[in-house]
Image: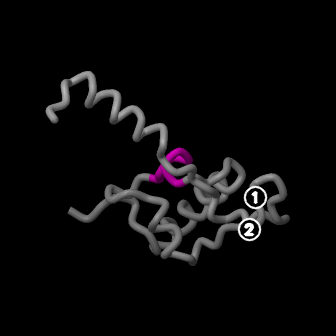
Amino acid sequence: MAYTKTDIKKIRKKRARLKKKLKCRFCPNGCDKPPRPVFVDYKDLKTLRSMIDREGNMLARRKTGTCALYQREVREAILRARFMALLPYVAEE
């Protein structure tokens, strides 16, 4: 069965809508009741590396699924880790 261009577009749109909903990895029991104080460790490089792309740019909330409160903390943690030379500012060429 050969698909036309319009069929292919419809299939891609449907797949995009069926994409799995991302969940904040920092909120233990939902983003409605985050723990206080909200804290992301700048020394946890494994987590922070997953929040930046290959070029060293921070990934958006849409990509990571992080809630707004924790995205601000992730940003601070990445900036601190860069300042302490734990993470690179730019990608190695």
Query: Residue 76's spot in the image, x, y percent?
Result: 62, 59
| Residue nearer the viewer, 2 or 65 | 2
Query: Residue 87's spot in the image, x, y percent?
Result: 44, 69
| Residue nearer the viewer, 33 or 74 | 33
Residue 30 falls in which quadrant of the image?
A: bottom right
Q: Residue at x 66, y 68 (%)?
A: 40
Distance (Cα) linking label 1 and label 2? 6 Å
Specify few, some or many for label 2: CA neighbours under 10 Å numbering under 14, 14-19, or 20 or more. few
**Name of the residue lying farthest toward the front:** 1
Residue 2 falls in which quadrant of the image?
A: top left
Residue type highlighted by circle 2: Pro
86 in the magenta segment: no
Q: Quadrant of the C terminus?
A: bottom left
Q: Residue at x 62, y 64 (%)?
A: 25
Q: Which residues are magenta?
A: 58-64
Query: Residue 33's spot in the image, x, y percent?
Result: 84, 57
| Residue nearer the viewer, 67 or 41 | 67
42 versus 63 height, above or below: below
Q: Residue at x 32, y 55 (%)?
A: 55
Q: Which residue is mark 1?
A: 30
Q: Which residue is mark 2?
A: 28
Query: Residue 10's spot in the image, x, y percent?
Result: 34, 28
Report if the CB atoms under discs 1 and 2 are less than 8 Å apart: no
Count of labels shown? 2
Q: Quadrant of the N terminus?
A: top left
Specify few, some or many for label 1: CA neighbours under 10 Å numbering under 14, 14-19, or 20 or more. few
